[in-house]
Image (cartoon, rainbow, N blue to C red):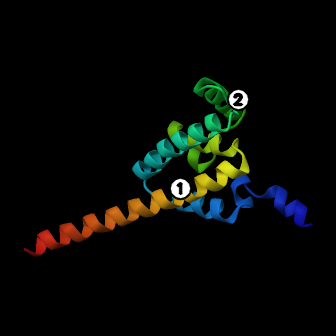
Amino acid sequence: MREEYYDKRRWYDRDPLLSKSMKTLEETDDETQIKVALNLIKIIIEHNISSNEFEAVGDILSAVEEGVEGRGNARWYDIDKTVRTAITMLENSSEQIQTIAAKEIAKMVLDKIKENKDDEIDIEEESEE
């Protein structure tokens, strides 16, 4: 029974931190999603090349294209090509890279939220003057 439930969950729900990071990313604005996706691509490329899983960036991109083929556009991250590429790269990464990426996603989203709050405070202070 437990295995049946486990198989029906999304691939990123198997790791609680990754699941929470993905949910937070899903709920952020488009600009933040794209910025996080670009950073995520960079992190994944750096880790895959340094771990010798791939010899060149072209190898990584070929693996991503293979992962995208045959899938529809029904998932939240399929709307933007950059976000879809980053998430597909993450899905095809090792658990170690997924864990590292989950922490980075959470950090980047939190930094963006803090930045937005600071901007709101600055605007409020300027309007009071």
Residue type at mark 1? Ile
Q: Quadrant of the N terminus?
A: bottom right
Residue type at mark 2? Glu
Residue visible at 64% across and 41% down in the picture: 88
Give the distance between the C-alpha atoms of the residues marked 1 and 2, in whole angstroms.
Answer: 24 Å
Residue visible at 60% across and 24% down in the picture: 58
Q: Quadrant of the C terminus?
A: bottom left
Residue visible at 54% across and 44% down in the picture: 43
Residue 117: x and y in percent read 32, 68
Q: Relative to residue 40, is residue 66 drawn left or right? A: right
Neighbor class of circle 2 (other Cα within 10 Å; few <14, some 14-19, many 20+) is few
The residue where tag 1 is placed is 105
Residue 81: x and y in percent read 53, 36
Q: Relative to residue 59, is residue 27 drawn left or right? A: left
Which callout, 1 or 2, points to the residue nearer the camera? 1
**Label 1: element kind:** helix
